[in-house]
Each structure stands twice: as C-alpha cells, then as structure tokens.
C-alpha cells in the first residue's frame, strides 16, 4: 500500500508541475501520442466513457485513486488483512497515463 501511495503522490506532483503547460485550451483531449485517445469512466459516478480535456481526465483519475486508496474494503488499514493486488495493478497502469500524455 505504501508504494501505491508514494507512486500516486509522485505522479500528482509531476502533473502539478506541468499544469501551466497542459490546460483545457492547450490539451482539449487526453491523449498519449497521436494514436491514442482516452475517455474517462469510473464505473460508479460516470458509467459511460466521456471525452474530456487532459486536465479534467487527470483530475478525475486522481480523485478516483484517492477514494480507492481510502477505501478500507480495498486497502485495509489493519495489520494482517490483505489488499487487492488487482486494484494496485489497475491504479499503477492508470497513473502512467498522465506521463504518457
């Protein structure tokens, strides 16, 4: 869990440092190069994928990861309880998308 939180914090800092260059106007779509375009859906609040700007996508992503990290059914705070490795894998993959943008 600690590694997931540290990774989340590092990506959050990285994206925070480039927000003046990646704005809603300059990055109207979340992309990773010219061939890949990403749409946001979290399966709960936004069930159908939506097209959004890169900053909006990253904000949705960071909010979703923060709520996932805070969810004790996924990441128990008590010693001896295991966390979901699939959730950690999903978060790690999604956290790479802002750096690909």
Image (cartoon, rainbow, N blue to C red):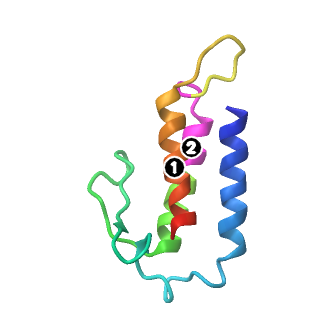
Residue 63 x %, y %: 56, 54
> Residue 96: horizontal and vertical position, in percent?
54, 56
- Is 39 placed left or right of 13 in the picture? left
- Could you tell me which quadrant the N terminus lies in? top right
Q: Which of 95 and 55 is in front in this view?
A: 95
Residue 14: name its quadrant: bottom right
**Bounds of the magenta segment:** 65-74
Q: Is mark 1 on a helix, strand or loop?
A: helix
Q: Between marks 2 and 1, how big is the CA–CA gap?
A: 5 Å
Find disc 1 in the rendering and name its residue. Answer: 64
On whether residue 14 falls in the magenta region, the answer is: no
Work out which residue is located at the far bottom of the displayed protein and give it. 25
Instruction: Identify the residue shown where x is 26% and y is 56%.
Output: 48
Q: Which residue is drawn at 57% across and 55% down?
A: 62
Q: Which of 30 and 33 is in front in this view?
A: 33
In this rendering, would 78 be left or right of 88? right
- Label the magenta part by its dominant secondary structure: helix
12 versus 65 height, above or below = below
Q: Is residue 68 magenta?
A: yes
Q: Name the residue under label 2.
A: 67
User: Residue 52 — which label?
Assistant: none
């Amino acid at each position: 869990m600690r590694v997931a939180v540290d990774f989340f914090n590092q990506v959050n800092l990285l994206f925070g440092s480039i927000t003046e260059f990646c704005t809603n106007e300059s990055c109207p779509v979340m992309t990773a190069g010219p061939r890949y375009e990403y749409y946001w859906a979290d399966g709960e609040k936004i069930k159908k994928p939506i097209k959004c700007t890169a900053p909006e996508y990253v904000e949705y992503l960071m909010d979703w990861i923060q709520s996932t990290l805070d969810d004790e059914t996924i990441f128990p705070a008590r010693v001896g309880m295991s966390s979901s490795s699939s959730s950690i894998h999903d978060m790690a993959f999604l956290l790479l998308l802002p750096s690909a943008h």
